[in-house]
Amino acid sequence: KGAGRGVVDRSVAVDIREFKCGLPSALYERGMRVVPLTMAVGDYVVAKGICIERKQHGKGRSDLRGSLANGRLLSQCEGMERYYEDGMVLLIEREEGVGVSTT
């Protein structure tokens, strides 16, 4: 077998602004190596070339709704596409008890 074959990188780069939520801690508790960075684009980089943008949707606060309304989500996705050619993911975190409307 070649060097590194079958080895899984358990590192995730996390934008420092994401440490206000519980996801970085949860990743660390599950054995991930969490690397805090100030990122220009995206919130998490989980593998070389794969970026995640996390949005919250809930009763009291909806980062998703605000980002859609002011066009920020589109520019964030364009930035991820520019810098992360291998892939991008939009993670929508829904507050428990909040429904999703398609109308």
Image: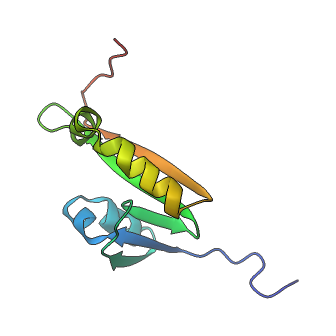
Q: Residue at x 43, y 48 (%)?
A: 77
- In the shown orientation, is residue 1 left or right of residue 50? right
Which image quarter holds the N terminus?
Answer: bottom right
Residue 6 percent across, percent down from the top left: 75, 75
Measured as percent of width and height from the top left, residue 42 is found at 39, 59
**Picture layout, residue 97 above or below residue 33:** above
Asked which quadrant contains residue 26, the reply is: bottom left
Q: Nearer the viewer, residue 51 or 9?
A: 51
Q: Quarter of the image containing the C terminus?
A: top left
Q: Residue shown at 52%/52% (left/top)?
A: 88
Q: Residue at x 47, y 66 (%)?
A: 45
Residue 56's x, y, as percent? 27, 43
Q: Residue furthest bottom?
A: 3
Q: How many marks?
A: 0
Camera-side residue of 44 and 24: 44
Q: How is the image coloured?
A: rainbow
Quick one: 67 or 17, which is closer to the camera?
A: 67
Q: Residue at x 23, y 66 (%)?
A: 17
Left or right, residue 34 beside residue 97: right
* Furthest residue toward left: 60
Residue farthest to the right, as pictured: 1
